Structure formats: structure tokens, C-alpha cells
Image: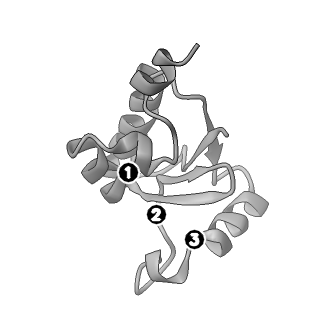
Amino acid sequence: MVIRVFIASSSGFVAIKKQQQDVVRFLEANKIESEEVDLTMSEEQRQWMYKTIPPEKKPARGNPLPPQIFNGDRYCADYDSFFASKESNTVFSFLGLKSQLASKAEP
């Protein structure tokens, strides 16, 4: 499956831009197949993302902010959860992927 990162290319918030870059850079550095989905370019994709995020993961007010991370159509989490998994060295299981060490050991 491809990891899909929902981003907003025209966000005016520096923090959101940095978070988006952090996720994308991590995926690129670890050679994880990914796709960026720009919410500002597709109302259909934005609505799909809003509907697919589980209710318990949505903010109490407003819409979920990018970056939002999916493995195919399965919701993984937002940036805060991604960062926590990165800090605890559990990103691969967080994303629903085999670790790179396990995949390199297989023939």
C-alpha cells in the first residue's frame, strides 16, 4: 500500500508547513512509497478525508488540519501521533508497514 499524506500547499501557517515537510522528508528518507494529496486542489479529496477520519480522532471544533496520514484507505493519524511514533521508533507499525530491517532480511 502507498502511504498518502494529505497536505495543504497554500497553508499560511508555518507550523503546518513544517509538519507536512517533516512527514514527507521522513517517508522519502526511509524510501517509503508515498503520495501527497493536496487538499487545496481537490474538494472531493478533502471531503473524502474528512469522512474517513474516525470521529474519535477529529478535533472537537473545526476540521482536521493537515498533515493527515493514511495507508491506502486506512487512517493512520495526524502529525502529533506521527511524531510520537517517530520518537518511540514505532513508525513502521504505526503506518501498518513491515520494518525495513525485516523486509531486508527476507529474500
Residue at x 63% of width, y 46% of height: 38
Where is residue 96 shown, x and y percent of the image? 52, 48
Residue shown at 67% from the left, 49% from the top? 72
- 22 with respect to 77 (left or right): left
Q: In the rendered image of this protein, does residue 79 appear above or below residue 22?
A: below
Q: Quadrant of residue 5?
A: top right
In three-dimensional space, the C-alpha distance between marks 3 and 2, rounded to whole angstroms, equals 11 Å
- Of 98 and 95, nearer the camera is 98
Check disc 1 and report its element: helix, strand or loop.
helix
Q: In the image shown, does 90 or 106 lie closer to the viewer?
A: 106
Q: Position of residue 45 (x, y in %)?
A: 73, 58
**Badge 1 local density, few (<14 within 10 Å), some, or many (20+)?**
some
Earlier-in-chain disc, 3 versus 2: 3
Q: How many marks?
A: 3
User: Which residue position is annotated with label 3?
Assistant: 53
Name the spot of residue 6 as percent of width and height, x first. Answer: 57, 50
Check disc 1 and report the residue beneath it: 16
Q: Amino acid at mark 2?
A: Leu
Q: Which residue is mark 2?
A: 65
Q: Earlier in the sequence, mark 1 or mark 3?
A: 1
Front of the two marks 3 and 2 = 3
Check disc 2 and report its element: helix, strand or loop. loop
Residue drawn at x 65%, y 38% as measured from the top left: 2
- Quadrant in the picture for residue 25: top left
Distance from the alpha carbon under mark 2 to that under mark 1: 8 Å
At label 3, which amino acid type do we have? Ile
What is the quadrant of the C terminus in the image?
top right
- Near mark 2 (Cα within 10 A), the count class, few <14, some 14-19 or many ≥20, is some
Q: The N terminus appears in which quarter of the rendering? A: top right
